[in-house]
Amino acid sequence: MSLNDHITGIQHVGIPTDNIEKTIEFYKSLGFEQAGLFLNGENRCAFMRFGNLTIETWEGDPVTKKTGAINHISMNTTDVEKAFAEAKEMGLNMVNDEIQSIPSFWDNGIKFFNILGPNEETIEFCQIL
């Protein structure tokens, strides 16, 4: 098996914000619907969806406020443990040595890991549990 056997396409694009209410209203004005609003510790995270595009926006991380403001792209992962093993076997530039989780997202939480691409871009592999 290979890494791409465990991904089905893009899951979301991550953009941090310093004003989540303003960001939610902006994307709603473009026709996006709010697919979810979750707590991650003391910070809020919203998922805005328009067709097959989902934007994750959250509080608490630095905001670039210029071109390059996208924090990460996320690949939808069907089996995060197998994908993680494949990524390590491929020698990809892993951000962490373990799979991370956020139990407060969606109905049963998420598990994910990140790699860095050749331009130091963050690519997340995320499984919604």
Image (cartoon, rainbow, N blue to C red):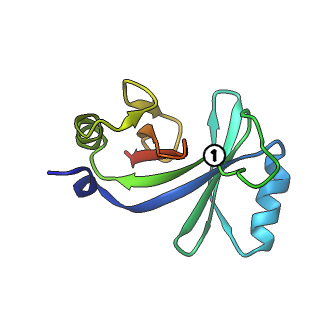
Residue 24 lies, in percent from the top left, at 77, 58
What's the residue at 63%, 46% (across, down)?
Answer: 71
> In this rendering, would 104 be left or right of 66?
left
Residue 17 lies, in percent from the top left, at 77, 45
Residue 58 lies, in percent from the top left, at 69, 43
Element on which disc 1 rests? loop
Quarter of the picture holding the C terminus: top left
Badge 1 density bin: few <14, some 14–19, many ≥20, Cα 10 Å: some
Residue 112 lies, in percent from the top left, at 42, 39
What's the residue at 57%, 62% (across, down)?
Answer: 54
Mark 1 = which residue? 71
Name which residue type carries label 1: Asn
What's the residue at 76%, 55% (across, down)?
Answer: 67
Looking at the image, which is closer to me, 65 or 41? 65
> In this rendering, would 59 be left or right of 103?
right
Work out which residue is located at the far front of the displayed protein and give it: 118
What's the residue at 37%, 24% (across, down)?
Answer: 97
